[in-house]
Image: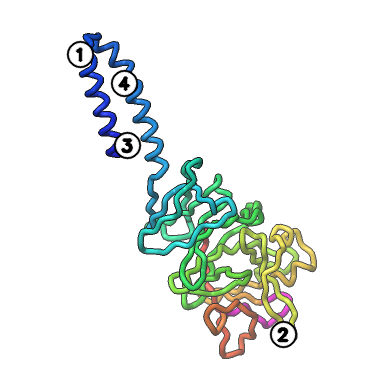
């Protein structure tokens, strides 16, 4: 309760006691009536105060409440590392309930959390522009986890310990600290129609809703993500071949050879912020060794 309201309530109590003495009314009876008014005032002030509580997370201070812009999924631009305020909320609205769940793919010692609003249907994300911005995004329904029990999820890294991540619909390789990216959990299922001795696997992203495929281009075979569910590919068929890669071990590392183009391997890009590509092992710029770190 604010200081002003506390002073008002205290003054009311003193005035009530003085009035009771003056009119010689039994104090216990008058107290019940007056305290009901006092407690009502205190309760209303407490609700108003809760409405303007401030939520502070990792150096970002924001007033919690629906702003006029939150109805269309936009948050006003904010800055990092200093206190910023959103516009004053509408008087007819109440504070937003924030859903908080841990991000199990990151270091638990850093207490990474995901913030959701509107029952978790929209989540707060950091936009990658000239400077960091915040916005609300709706997670696609297709990003649910694969339902098959044999599915395994891995974080794949190159020899420089850079991770595979997704940006603008492409599978890139980058450093999470430098490139401000989050490692993609790659869903892996076997291709049961091909020789098991060669360990043929399917690679799915975004919970298996998009898969890595080999396509023919004028410059030769290339890689791209396609909107094909990994569970459908697991059922078999010739179409699954161009989504299949033979996994061979090289010490603790692995190489991924395209089943549809023998002799061509998945390779990390030579330049930063570029997508993974197919290359021949004989090429001097080939970066075909990857490490698979199993994720939950």
Residue 25 rendering spot, x and y as whole percentages: 24, 9
Going 31% across and 19% down the picture, which residue do you hit?
A: 34
Colour approach in the figure? rainbow
In terms of sequence position, does the residue under pointer 2 or pointer 1 come before the other?
A: 1
- Left/right of residue 10 with respect to residue 143 in the rendered view: left
- Left/right of residue 181 with respect to residue 222 in the rendered view: left
For residue 219, above or below residue 153: below
- Which residue of the protein is positioned furthest toward the front in this rendering? 23
- Magenta region, residue range: 258-268
- Which residue was labeled with disc 1? 22
Numbered disc in front, either 4 or 1: 1
Residue 48 in view (yes/no): yes
Residue 43 rendering spot, x and y as whole percentages: 37, 30
- Which residue was labeled with disc 4? 35
- Are the two marked residues, 4 and 1, in contact with CB atoms closer than 8 angstroms? no
Q: Secondary structure at mark 1?
A: helix
- What whole-number distance in Å separates the C-alpha atoms at marks 2 and 3? 70 Å
In terms of sequence position, does the residue under pointer 3 or pointer 1 come before the other?
A: 3
Question: Which quadrant of the structure image shows residue 136?
Answer: bottom right
- Which residue of the protein is positioned furthest toward the right in this rendering? 238
- Which residue was labeled with disc 2? 220
| Quadrant holding the N terminus | top left
The foreground one among 14 and 157 is 14
- What whole-number distance in Å separates the C-alpha atoms at marks 4 and 3? 17 Å
Q: Secondary structure at mark 4?
A: helix
In terms of sequence position, does the residue under pointer 4 or pointer 2 come before the other?
A: 4
- Which residue was labeled with disc 3? 1
- What whole-number distance in Å separates the C-alpha atoms at marks 4 and 2? 84 Å
Numbered disc in front, either 2 or 3: 3
């Amino acid at each position: 309760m604010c200081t002003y309201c506390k002073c008002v309530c205290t003054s009311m109590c003193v005035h009530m006691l003085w009035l009771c003495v003056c009119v010689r009314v039994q104090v216990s009876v008058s107290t019940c009536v007056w305290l009901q008014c006092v407690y009502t005032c205190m309760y209303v002030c407490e609700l108003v105060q809760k409405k303007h509580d401030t939520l502070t997370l990792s150096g970002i201070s924001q007033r919690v409440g629906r702003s006029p812009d939150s109805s269309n999924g936009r948050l006003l631009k904010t800055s990092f590392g200093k206190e910023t305020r959103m516009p004053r909320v509408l008087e007819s609205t109440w504070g937003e309930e924030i859903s908080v769940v841990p991000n199990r793919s990151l270091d638990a010692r850093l207490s990474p959390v995901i913030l959701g609003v509107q029952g978790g249907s929209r989540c707060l994300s950091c936009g990658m522009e000239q400077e960091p911005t915040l916005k609300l995004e709706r997670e696609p329904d297709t990003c649910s986890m694969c339902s098959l029990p044999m599915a395994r999820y891995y974080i794949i890294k190159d020899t420089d310990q850079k991770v595979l991540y997704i940006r603008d619909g492409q599978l890139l390789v980058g450093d999470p600290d430098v490139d401000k990216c989050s490692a993609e959990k790659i869903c892996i299922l076997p291709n049961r129609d091909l020789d098991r001795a060669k360990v043929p696997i399917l690679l799915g992203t975004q919970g298996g809703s998009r898969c890595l495929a080999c396509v023919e281009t004028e410059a030769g075979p290339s890689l791209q993500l396609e909107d094909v569910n990994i569970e459908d590919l697991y059922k078999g068929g010739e179409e699954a071949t161009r989504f299949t890669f033979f996994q061979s071990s090289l010490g603790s590392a692995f190489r991924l050879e395209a089943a549809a183009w023998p002799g061509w391997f998945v390779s990390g890009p030579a330049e930063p912020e570029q997508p993974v590509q197919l290359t021949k092992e004989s090429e001097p710029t080939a970066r075909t060794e990857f490490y698979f770190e199993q994720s939950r």
